[in-house]
Amino acid sequence: MHSSILVFRNFRYLKITLAILAAAILAYAIHDPLGKPNGGTWLGYTLGGLSAALIVWLAWFGVRKRRYGVGKLLLEDWASGHVYLGLSLLIVATLHSGFQFGINVHTLAYALMVLVIGSGAFGLYAYMRYPRLRSVNRGEGALGDVWALVAGMSRDCYEIARDLPDEVYTLVEAADKETAIGGSVWRQLSGKDPKCASTRALQQVRDLAERYSGRDADAARRLVRVLARKVELLTRIRKDIQYKALLDIWLYFHIPLTVALLGALAIHIVTVFLYW
Amino acid sequence: MAEHYQVAIVGSGPCGMSAGGRASEQNMSHVVLERTDHLSDTIYKYQKGKHVMATPDILPLRSSMAFDAGTREAILGKWDEQTDKLGVNVRYNAEVTEISGEKGSFTLTLKNGETFTAEHVVLGIGLQGNLRKLACPGGDWEGVQYQLDDPDEYEGENIVVIGAGDAAIENAVALAKNNNVYIINRRDEFARAKDGNRNLIEAAIENGDITCYHSADPASVSPGKLTLTVPDGEAEVECDRIIARLGAVAPRKFVESCGIEFPSKDPASLPELSPQYESNVPGLYIVGALAGFPLIKQAMNQGYEVIEFIRGNDIKPADEPLLEEMFKALPGGRSVDEVITHIRENVPLLRSLTPLQLREFLLDATIHVPNANDVIFERNDYTNSFFMIVEGSANIHIDENDPSIKVTVGVGDFFGEIGLIAGRRRSATVNAAEPSFLLESPRRSMIKLINSVEAVERAMNEVALVRQLRTYLLPSLTDEAIQPVLETAEVRAFKSGKVLFKEGDADDGVYLIRKGSVTVSRRIGGKDIVIAYVPAGHYVGEMAFLTRARRNATVRAAINTETIWLESESFRQMVDASPELRSEVERRLLTRVIESESMHTRPEAGNIIQFLVEQGVGEATDILLIDETLCVACDNCEKACAETHGGVSRLNREAGPTYARIHVPTSCRHCEHPHCMADCPPDAIHRAVDGEVYIDESCIGCGNCERNCPYGVIQLSSGAPKKPGLFSWMMFGSGPGPGENKVWNKANKKEDGSPKVAVKCDMCLNVPGGSACVRACPTGAAIRVSPEDFFSLSELSARG
Ligand SMILES: Cc1cc2nc3c(=O)[nH]c(=O)nc-3n(C[C@H](O)[C@H](O)[C@H](O)COP(=O)(O)OP(=O)(O)OC[C@H]3O[C@@H](n4cnc5c(N)ncnc54)[C@H](O)[C@@H]3O)c2cc1C
Ligand code: HEM
Ligand code: HEM
Ligand code: SF4
Ligand code: SF4
């Protein structure tokens, strides 16, 4: 009934891509140019034109994605075609260049293209892998209003800590005030906070509580339970943020590199015509 | 000696106040008795700054007082000023508790014992009823309140909220932010509340944000303290404030105590009135919302008219021009009265209506004058209106495969009832057999009518039963074949969750589902596992019947369900007599066997069905689901929704429950019998041909639908702030880019009090190509499914 972009419509876009590739490779194999194969032969122009058209089309995806409620195709059609045809460039553009790389603007365009494709490939990997992990991490319910949940637990901690010695209360206070969620890109991507104040509080309260007895021991035990739940929730939230960050981060490379690629490509095309 | 008046008007809502104005203008001796200390309590209680709308636009206003769309404050201010100027005699704090006597000498008794006498009484007390008060000793402590306008007003207080409904929960949760809140529930769970609210309160209690006393009853109140009876004795709660949200007592009891009769017990039924709004008690008139006219303008017109009627002035109702306009479509230039008489003569179903009911009914109806062969509706359309033939005839094509099989219905007959009852797709195509005159009535009027006029329900059921048997069993069944079954057939209704029959029971007949849906479950490994979901239009119970064995599964209503019960023996005779029917029944049985066997080995799939049924999929015609294994949380679905719907998304992707990686976002289910439609004053909610439930521009923003939708998918919105055009975004970066509406809307929020209307998913009714959300999902995670897709959906679990 529905499927991921890779198997979408029974691999329609994979099939189209394979057909294009087969044609390109076959042409390259039987083509016998004067001298080495390169971008300047008729086949070179054809493959170059095809590559450029593909790149422009791939970049247009960014526009199409934001044109809502139009078009006959689903966005998933575009996405499915995008990944397969995008990957095919590795072959089509390489054949176009005739494997002639150097230190020049042509190869710059090529290199940028490879980077875009590389980031895209990571994106594809992320799209295939992380949603499921994220869903599993979330468990049955949506995490819901996590801030409210965390705040509620902090409040519970205070409530219990009020009757405990000051040393514990300070820890609880620190756990409430200094626990951070999110933070820098690195922090988000790592999915951990080695300096998490709540985790620290949990450990230290546990150490302190060993010495308590009677009502204090009871309260400390309850506190440890609440803190443990909080830490567990925080861990899950951080994981959730990590997955989301991984799902997003590559686009911060993919898109700017696309823009750079379009620029370099324009220069490449202009120069080859100028120096013709 | 009690004060005596020509006319006593009870209630100072739009109708009562307008009646008072007219009476005063005509120098009639009159009194308006108002329960509260201000005019028009219902409108007084609207949210501050609410924009009040003057629908329907085409209806002229006929009143001594002014009314135009505007803010609540402006309208109330104007009315205060005009009642003053006209010298209307209003008594405030005058709640009428008893009306006795007869035309010429009624006695009205107030709560404080004061009495008035009057020749005529006009009852205009609306439908809001009395807020239920705290009955225990000390309940009159000034710290007890029955409303909460602004929860942010209170801070650091101990507050007790009494009640377990949506209002109580919403108040408690809102107050808990800054206060120490207790909630008192008489029962042991929050069953009455919407799912969303129930989750909220349960989470708040679980986290300790709110302290809950279950199975507790207020025993007494003293200033600063509430005493409760709890299961193990008594409990005391110190409090600065008590907010009691105990619901309202509908005014019906009071109305009945005045001698006014209602045609049925159904709460939706309306008292019978003469065209002059006179009830069965001569001299006692009913107008406004209580009489079934739920809008302000209608109420004001009636207030004016009722005074004219009492003065013996037989004026034409203000809605006459509307009917005139409507009847213009008819050939022959007949007058309104002529047409109405003609309709009454030709359509037996409408004969038992009072003239007023008929008029109201016609105002909501649409007139069609199709030519021969014009299609009225098509099989598989999702419309739910009802048609009556005033002149001409129509052909119903009941067999999908053979258009030559048709039933012709003529003058006085009706059609469309199957769709109306089932809330599902039309089961036949109907076209006009000759040039005809048809009356199309929307679902709401029909439901009102069925609830108010018993004869209508009976007549409809009789015809519907035969047609449903044919439609759901076999179109070619002859009358003779159906007759014996019909004699024993019974309509049996089951509330959501109730059992039709249990595994191991003896066979007692076959159940044809004509409304709602059921789940079939079996005990596997000591647990009830759902093995099938059966929607309306199918039957259950045939397995035991064919195999002559005991029930091998339990069948439960997934939602409120109506079945046609067919007694085994007569059904067996019918099946035996028709080989065609026999093979049809057998064929369906085999399909069921295959399905249930495949489910057997995958109890997880059954659990998914169970989960989806709990999420309202059982009553959905189309629901948005998100496959969490594919969703990358890009929110493009929400963005697409906002972009195609004036900047406001009608869908909340993140919210909503998840089970087995299937996420049910907060978005309309397009219910078969939409709860949101139940109580919409301007009847602004409709269902389109493809099943889309949508709200049209006549919405007045009353919020009833928001409250009535159990899935919390409707929001009141004043629309998105205008954003700079695409060009200025690209060139100068002003405003948000395409899709980036959320932050922009928040930052540029319109001021409070700008007109708000209800918005919800309309399945992109006006977007070419359909559902923008699904089409904008890059990964294919967002899908729309109808209940028929359940089985393939449960395949999901096989993958994941
Ligand atoms: C939130 C909301 C928004 C709405 N918005 C609109 C809108 O924008 N436009 C529109 O046209 N309609 C709107 N409506 C509908 C409209 O409010 C009603 O149709 C209208 O108020 C009905 O008028 P009424 O005079 O029949 O009754 P009401 O307005 O209900 O008036 C009844 C009056 O009788 C008094 N009363 C009751 N019992 C007694 C008693 N025993 N003794 C003495 N007095 C008594 C009450 O205190 C009250 O003042 C809205 C309704 C709601 C709930
Ligand atoms: C309209 C499209 C294109 C045209 C007309 C074109 C044209 C050419 C020509 C004429 C050459 C030979 C230049 C020479 O031998 O000095 C060439 C080489 C090359 N082109 Fe293109 N090209 C196009 C698109 C592309 C694209 C999309 C890429 C990859 C991003 C690309 C990458 C290269 C590379 C790497 C070379 C080899 C450079 C070298 O010889 O050092 N070209 N191209
Ligand atoms: C030169 C080749 C490519 C170009 C120019 C290109 C360009 C783009 C652009 C402009 C977007 C839109 C991003 C946005 O606006 O959010 C995009 C998205 C994407 N690209 Fe590429 N891309 C290329 C190759 C690839 C390849 C090879 C892959 C995968 C193997 C890939 C995977 C994706 C994915 C998964 C998305 C995100 C889809 C979404 O979430 O909407 N791209 N690409
Ligand atoms: S708004 Fe709510 S009640 Fe109305 S159809 Fe949608 S889900 Fe059903
Ligand atoms: S659509 Fe909803 S808010 Fe609008 S008038 Fe109807 S019930 Fe009220």
Image (spheres, coloured by chain):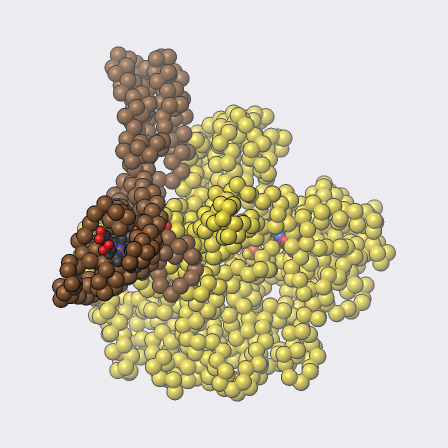
Chain colours: A brown, B yellow
In the image: residue B119, left or right of residue A171: right
**Residue B596, position as x, y percentages in the image:** 22, 62
Q: Vertical placement of A119 versus B557: above or below?
A: above
Q: Vertical placement of A205 versus B439: above or below?
A: above
Q: Residue at x 52, y 54 (%)?
A: B646
Q: Is B632 in front, or is B384?
A: B632
Q: Residue at x 31, y 75 (%)?
A: B571
Q: In which quarter of the view is residue A139 placed?
A: top left
Q: Residue at x 47, y 59 (%)?
A: B762
In the image: residue B334, left or right of residue B662: right
Q: Vertical placement of B555 versus B546: above or below?
A: above
**Residue B689, position as x, y percentages in the image:** 46, 69
Q: In which quarter of the view is residue B586 placed?
A: bottom left
Q: Residue at x 36, y 28 (%)?
A: A180
Q: In which quarter of the view is residue A80 placed?
A: bottom left
Answer whether residue A250 is visible to the viewer in this image.
yes
Q: Is A134 in front, or is B565?
A: A134
Q: Vertical placement of A32 versus A263: above or below?
A: below
Q: Is B567 in front, or is B186?
A: B186
Q: Residue furthest front?
A: A275
**Residue B659, position as x, y percentages in the image:** 30, 48
Q: Residue furthest right?
A: B27
In the image: residue B475, left or right of residue B453: left
Answer whether residue B257 is visible to the viewer in this image.
no
- Image label count: 0
**Residue A210, position as x, y percentages in the image:** 25, 15
